[in-house]
Amino acid sequence: MGTAIPSIACLGVIGRNNNPLHITIFPTHSHDGSQIPVRSPLQFSLILSSTLDIFSLRARHFAATNVGLTTGDYGLLHAIDERLAAYGFETNTGVKFVVVVDMRGRRADSTPSAGGGEVVGGGGRERKGTGGGVGNAAAAAAAAVGLREGEMKPVFKAMQTAYIKLLQNPFFDPDEHSPPTGTGGKKITSKKFADDMRRIGESWMPGITSL
Amino acid sequence: MEKPFSSSKVTVEYHDPHDVYKLLAPGLIPRLPLRDLHWQSHNGPVRSIQALHIELVPAGADRTSTFSPLTSPAAKPTESAPSRDDGFLAAQVGGQLAPIERVNTGETIPQGVAGAGKGRRHQIPGLRRTPYLKVLFVRCDDNETYKSATRAEIKEWIKNNTPQSKPASNAENHDAFEWLIVHVVIPNTVAATQPRVSGTKIPDGSSDAGSKTASSRWRGGSSTLLEKLRSDFNSSSRNAVDRVRQIRIGINDVPYDLLPRVVPAVPTGYQETEQDSENAWADLILKFKELILSSFDTRVSQYEEDIKERDGQRGLPGWNFCTFFILKEGLARGFESVGLVEDALVGYDELSVGLDAIIREQAISGSAEAHGGALLSYTEELKDFAKKAISEVARDSTQDDDETVDLQAPGKTQLDSSDEIPISTSKKPYRELILANNVSLFDFRCYIFARQISLLLRLANAWSTREELLAKLKEQQELVPRGVAPRTPAPKQADESENLAQLAEICRRTLEFVPAISMIARKDIMSALAVPDGERKDEGLSLEDPVITEVAENVIASFAFSVAQQILAQTSTRSLPIPPSTLGVPDGHEPKAAIPEPKTMMHPARNSSLHSRASQRPPPSPVGFPPRPPDPATPNSPFLKPGLEELAARRADLYALSRNILEECGKKRGWTGGWSSVPVVGEPDIAGMEDVSLDDEVSATDQDTDSQAGRQVLMAGLKNHLLSAALGSQDSFYRLYEILTDKALQHYTVAGHEHSIRTNLADLAVLKFSLGEFSEASSCFYRAIPVFGESGWSLLELSMLLMYARCLKELRQMDDYVNKALRQLLIKAAGAERDRLRQKSQLRLGSRSHVQYPESSSIAGYLTDLLAVSASLSKEVKIPLTSLFCDLEIDGPPIYDEGQDSFSLYLNLYSLVVDTFEVRQARLRIVCPSPGNSRDIWLENVGPVTIKPGRNRVRLRSSIMMMGTYEVDQIHLASSNVSLHYERDNGVLKNPKVTLYQRTSALDARLHTTKEVRLDRNNSLDLEVSSGWNDIKTCEVRIKSATGGLRLLMSEATVPGPIQPSKQFEGGVFTFGDIPPNTSVRIRFPFTIEHDLLNVAVKADVFYSTDKGSFGFSHTSSVPITLALGVNVQDVFKHDALFSRFSVSSASASPLRLFRSELLESEMFESFFGTPPSHPIVIFPKQPASLLYKVRRKPGVKPTTKKKQTLHLKLYYSVVQEEIEALFVEGISEQLDEAGLREYSKLVSSRVLHFVRGGLSANDLERAALLGELGTQFLSDVNWEKQFPGLGLMMPSTSNTPSGTAIRNCIDSWLKNNAKVLLSPNLDGAGMAPISIVIPVDITPITIVHTADIRLQEPIASVTGAVTSSATGYPTVCTNQVLPATLHLKWTRIWDTTAPEPARAGPGAVSAVPVVARSQDLEFGYEITAPSDTWLLGGRRKGHFVISAMPDADGEDGLTSTPDTEADIPLLLIPLREGWLPYPSVEIREVQANNGLEGGDMGRGHGHGEHHCETDYRNLGETVHVIADRGKVTLSLDASGPGGGPLVLESDRAIMSGKVIA
């Protein structure tokens, strides 16, 4: 059945100064089978940029109500259109992770049903198939009812892990990327981090519990 | 949360057999709605219902036809009648009379006869719309009627309408109701004359109804009608509820025709008071409330029980979610109906979650039946619609276009009503479908969502819901029979505002709902199409068919779009001030107004509808909402309503959502919002971003153009008129896109969402740009760009800058174009490039193949453009150099040109610009950082410089030479009218230090002090300009003082030597003509200083030209001007000569060597010196040399001017330290010459001297002076290589050795070979001339010099008898021997050398005194004194003498005493003790004529106004040897004398001649 299941269209890491630290864009499936991103990089940049309002709004809200946001998970930030939705997460150091999910970015039938985890496709970078049966079903369920709260948790967790790994690199200077002056900052140039992001984005599918 | 305005209603059924309702209504209606009900729920706090509306329904009537107080007679079709599909009035929004409503009247029809409670009952309760209360209005005018008829009627009614058996079944409890009998009393009847209670006048009457109280007043003595009713129909049990009420109608309230004409015969006199009437009404209302709540309570508990039970069965097979849903919804609706909207909402939320859970479980388990029952896999409508669309497509492809019109028309009309309002509870008989288990997930969700939205709208008090309700209320009130004024005025509607936060919540939910429902809808359609149709088996629809997918997507998009639009319409409120569009966009678009008329909306006249805000306003509400003037205030105004920002943001999100849907649809048609054509400028992306290549876009447009049919295909499935209209043509697409974006923008502006504002601005800008509306685009860009840049979204910024630049160019705003756009653009592009470079360098290890960024081509040409355009600008365009270049670096040390005095620097810079451009002028300034001595040199390029992308090396040359250490200060690159400048910055430029040294062969200007110092004249400085290797054609030397207080007397300057200035020099500028190589010109100029200075500095600028060009040299040199020695003089005047003793000491720590000295005689005096020493005298700092000269007055010379009298002491000396320094310099220079480092010798020697000066202590110098040699050890531990940084390789590039190393080697070897330097005994070896100094020596004029001489008379009788005075130089006498002596006094005036200056003579003039002195008599007194124990003096010890005036001031006469004028005063001297006795002292003092003898010192000092006189006392220091006068002494050698000494036994006096025995 040609059901499309959600996939990640874009992963963004935004620094404390609201400066983009990293953006990875993933091609998504379209009906003619081609794999191109649904939006141009510029548009994704704009989308990420506009989520910052929600972050600041929620942060203010949490500050006002004095509710400590223990997880930092902001949930759905934006429904961009009927396909794309942006989810957000903020670390306690103010680094924000944004996941733009394409609700039908991947074909469910492109996922091999038997046993997950193998990497298919020599030339392409696309890594298909992950979770196996349960994952498939969950994916189908997600397709049926939309993404629930918490579906994004593994993604954020993985992103945070990757970011923490990055921070552990002694040559990585966080202040360079989010200067305490409050403006600007450099991008993350770690290849490992970029690879991590790519891996996360490509391997996630609804129902996956760890990445 | 407070419910600001409750719109809830409950049904109350009334039975009116006597037709009294119309009488009652005027009193009843105004008292409704019921207010302030308090309901205690079973498991929660007390809920308050502020107002509860009651729908009074006549029993048994067909309400739709006969009584429709709540149904507006279709005045506004959109604001339609309430749906009658359930017993609860849901807040309807723009609902419509749907024909399908009749479907479920099967349920509701029995309500008319529901009194029996036996209607068809579905097994699932909760659908029933039953009254909470049944009221029977009874008219009974008197007791007789009551007895005969009324009582029976009532009994019958009760029997029919009330449940007979308590407890009722569960099902009945769902419809639990209460009943009430209202006795309506008509005026002018018997009943009206009765009091309510018979016992009112009798206090003892018990309140127990039915007790008959005997009352004489009442005929028949019966109780009142009310009491009868109570006793008959209230249950007898104690806790039973009182169900009887009586209302008396006032006589004025009854229409005349209804008023009974006959007044009862017996008036009782009872008057109903106003108060009584009020009480009765209040009592009735209270009863209403009580009974309604009671029945509500019963129902709720029943529902809750049922739900609990059902929920518990969840795990059981066969459990059906739909059933459960209906049950639970029943409860929710119950809540809603009494105004507990929040509770209702919670119920629906729980249901929604429950549904999700069910779906999820089903999906996971894979079996739909297992849990909660299956839902339909597709929705019929969707399926139909999709099929239709597909078939349209199919037909389209085969048939002609005109067919489509026909095909679409019916479809549209059919769907017209429902497609724009997708979310409505009344769109479909949802509940029926759910009940029938015949609902798709899509519908299910839609229904829940619709319910949630409507509840929220109620909570939000949205004007749409409220107005409906108010309208109904009003109608209800208007139905009151005319002519009968309501007793109470219509209750004021509190002007309660909408709850914006709730509206925002609606939007929020919508935002979540849309994606979810889209997914569902998609699945729905897919599965619908997957099910093969019975009739069209042949089709075999493939899901992979792009047409299907397209159609499905269209349907979904359309659906989502409609939802968004609907919610936007529903949440629009006047409380949300949306500023008018700043873009001049026609603002008339308000979705609510526009939805019904998509056509007019779609083609607005762009120019005419500017800011027509009127249409934006919702229609004026009927009550209480005066249209507020549109508030143009900023969204930040202080009276923000709570939730306003939130709502604005959410609505903006919805607009954005719609916009994005539209955009996606448009994309398929190749109409992008301009984004696809946006140039992407390369930005570092580690992941190797996959770019949408521009080719794709091209092909897309190709597709777009080639097949019109393709476009038609895509149109299918778009239900939403607005959307489909927008997608009908490119124009309207862009139009709608713009409107939506602008809407979102304005909303975001209100919400204060900065980032989103920018995003939308960017969207708008891009759109405008692609549409070619450049001025609007540029204003958008102008607003959006800076902020993106600030926070590092450089990718966005760059692309937008590119477009901005293009806009400005199109607009011909060249200044902005250049300064705002291009400049920024280039800078940013360069910045991006720099990032890329940096990343590249970091990733080098990763060995990734780096693709060259092709995007850079998109910014190619801009620089050229910039340069070209800038030429037309009046102002220079300044761009910081560092923003376009990186890796600025001074490459290596200065390069010196051989044979000429110029040098070059290489500037390396990395151009980040993609264009190659030519630099007209490149300049670089180096400055000397030392404070107070700011020097700078400009270096310029030689010839044009072309800057290519990437690395560039620019040679900059300067022909100015100033040695020193410099730092690069500024760099300027000028090309066209663009100036790229660099100001000194932190660490941007690498190797900014430049060390310039002066080559030995280069032109040099050195400052020296003259070797001949004259203290009586202004000293002069020598500036030696040596041409070096330059064959100078013209040369100009400027000399300036560089020390404060130093004044150069240039007018007295001289140029000794053969080369003379070609022009008269003035003001320190000397111009020379040809100066051949290796020639030096010396310029000598005197100077004065205003205060003592140790050093003076002089700046010499030499500008000269040779065949190789013109050059400059500038040097500030400083020389010490302190004297190396100090001279003191001591004069001793004698009668005919003056002895001057000069003590010469060293003024510094360094010893001096004094080679020669002479005292130059003057016209008046001559000097004599002894034999000069053969060796130079070494003067140590603590050991001055003493030189004694004898000065004599030349005879016959008259004292004239002072000048001629002055002697000059001339000393030839050298400073040992300078000698040593010269030795070092010479030695090292020689060594360097040998090593081929000749050009460095000046540099090196200056450094070496520095160390020599620092390394030598005073002790070293002393030793060197003593020993004549000096060890060079102290220089060997200097790191010489470090002393010469920035020299580069050796200049004659013979080897690769750096110059510093070579120099070090050279110095080291010299030090090794010369462990000691020898000071030459005389200066010949050193080749330097001794310094001469001429010190003027004045002879102090002394008026009189006396000579006093005590002469003992010869021969002196000596003890020894011999004349000893001549032999030993001093006489030997005995004590007490009388010595006759004479005091010889003589004087001279020869030392009175004051020149006669008669003219200057004046009363106070000091100079007049000596003039007078010579021509007047001077009286002196003498006094001989001696210690009284030493000498006994005889003779005239004191006396006066007069020196007569000179007869002739100029003559020789009287100049010196002659024997005539000398005095010989006889004296007798008797020495009193033995020893060497000094002569008595003689003092000579001038005696002032007027005050007689004046005591005072006549020595060198001079008294007040008296004359200088000196006394040469010749006996000073002479002694007389006095011995005892014993001739013979006999001693006893034993210690018997006094004190143990020898005892003098005998002594003989010497017998001398002339001995006086005292």
Image (tube, rainbow, N blue to C red):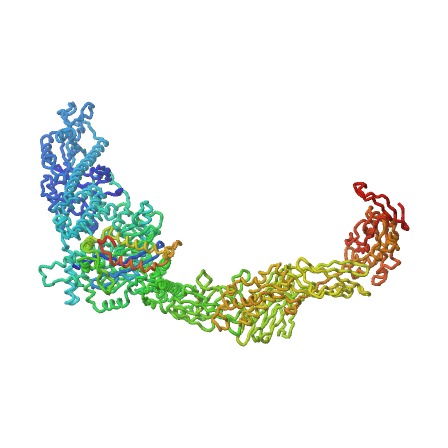
B322 relative position to B958: left or right? left
Res B1256 → quadrant? bottom right
Viewer-side residue, B123 vs B863: B863
Residue B1386: where, in percent of width, then height?
85, 57
Viewer-side residue, B1081 vs B728: B1081
Q: Residue at x 82, y 46 (%)?
A: B1429
Viewer-side residue, B83 vs B910: B910
Confirm whether residue B821 shows in the render.
no
B992 relative position to A40: left or right? right
* Quadrant position of the C terminus of chain B in the picture: top right
B1217 relative position to B1348: left or right? left
* Quadrant position of the N terminus of chain B in the picture: top left
Residue B336: where, in percent of width, then height?
20, 43
Q: Residue furthest right?
A: B1553
Residue B815: where, in percent of width, then height?
41, 65
Question: How many tags in the picture?
Answer: 0
Q: Residue furthest front?
A: B1534
Viewer-side residue, B380 vs A160: A160
Image height check: is B1303 above or below B199?
below
Residue B575: where, in percent of width, then height?
30, 49
Image height check: is B1271 above or below B481?
below
Q: Residue at x 46, y 73 (%)?
A: B943
Confirm whether residue B980 shows in the render.
yes
B114 relative position to B1013: left or right? left
